[in-house]
Image (cartoon, rainbow, N blue to C red):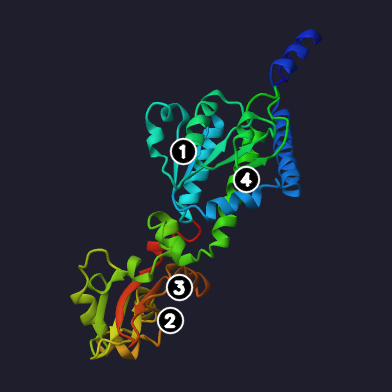
Amino acid sequence: MSAPARKYVEPNRQMENLQSGLTTKFEQLQLATEIIKREADALKNLAANLPDDFCVATDLILDCDGCVIVTGIGKAGWIGQKTSASLASVGVRSHFLHPAEAIHGDLGRVGPNDIVLVFSNSGETGEILKLLPSFKKFQTPIIAITGKQDSTLSAHSTAVLNYGKTNEACHLGLAPSTTTALMLALGDALTLVVSKTKQLQADDFAKFHPGGSLGKRLSLVEQVMRPISECRIANETATVREIYIQQGGRERRTGVVLIIDQKSRLTGIFTDSDLAKLLEKQQDELFDEPIRNVMTQSPITIAAGSKTLLAIETLACRNLSELPVVDADGRALGLIDITDVVNVRSGQ
């Protein structure tokens, strides 16, 4: 079967196609690569030429007894919202103030001990300029993140983080792209320098991230373990047959039996894999012997009060599916099952 004939396209029409859009996946990937390179180059330049007022800005945030009120409009506003959320996540009280809502009553959110962090590429954004007289009246210090040093916003600011004139990565040079990347980088830099200066520790970070996979990683094992009431437990004198008959109908069945002595101290574990091995080897006579004869003695455990992240690392490094949690006296308190933490190993 002959190949279909290619459709003839006049040279003028080919030029129109190239001017109106990208005609091949190669051209799309080529442009995407160029966009990322342009933004990366701008970030490298910023890293090599940090604004002179950067430390002034960090000191204002560190010395702030109130809140960091963040504002901006359009794409700059979205960057501001992210920065405000990041500041809050490291223990710096922060709120986002929408400029349009601010002049209709939300200026009441600005307190006497607050500072304002403003995002505006031009420094001449109309909605922002309308707020400046009020900030001056309130005697509220302003940190400006902008691309123009000699703007109205800069003139009213205590600290100016000027990243300078830059070209947007957009093919029209219009859509905020490079400028928002620079704003985001400066917002992150402020947040993380303040966090490091305040000597924020993992325990502090965990207080502000109790939910989601990140919260689980930073939580204590007691907060995510299956409590002993939901585990299969047995005395070391019980037989394998007795244990599996008595506990066969449990809901949320775990793949391990925790073996304890008369003082509830963990002395061993017996897994479903151990049971399968007895069946494979046709060692039926062991089903009616005390489980201590076939259990894994002195199993790997984790102490109560340990971080869940340590439990996850132990499960991964030791190739385990279950990890018993014990108290200081070796008593079994619960169980970390890999299915309970598999989604939080590297999550956010």
From the image, tell me which residue sits under label 1: 138
Query: Mark 2 or mark 1, which has the lower sequence index?
Result: 1
Query: Mark 3 or mark 1, which has the lower sequence index?
Result: 1
338 sits left or right of 166 in the view: left
Q: As shown in the figure, which amino acid type bears the numbered disc 2?
A: Ile
Q: Nearer the viewer, residue 115 or 178?
A: 115
Q: Nearer the viewer, mark 2 or mark 1?
A: 1
Q: As shown in the figure, which amino acid type bears the numbered disc 3?
A: Leu
Distance in Å between CA atoms under marks 2 and 3? 9 Å
Decide: marks 2, 3 in contact (CB < 8 A)?
yes
Q: As shown in the figure, which amino acid type bears the numbered disc 1?
A: Phe
| Tag 2 secondary structure | loop
- The residue carrying pointer 4 sits among few (fewer than 14), some (14 to 19) or many (20 or more) residues within 10 Å by Cα, namely many
From the image, tell me which residue sits under label 4: 186
Identify the mark at residue 300; answer none if there is no mark.
2
Q: Nearer the viewer, mark 2 or mark 3?
A: 2
Q: Nearer the viewer, residue 276 or 70?
A: 70
Distance in Å between CA atoms under marks 3 and 4? 42 Å
Let me know if residue 251 appears in the view: yes
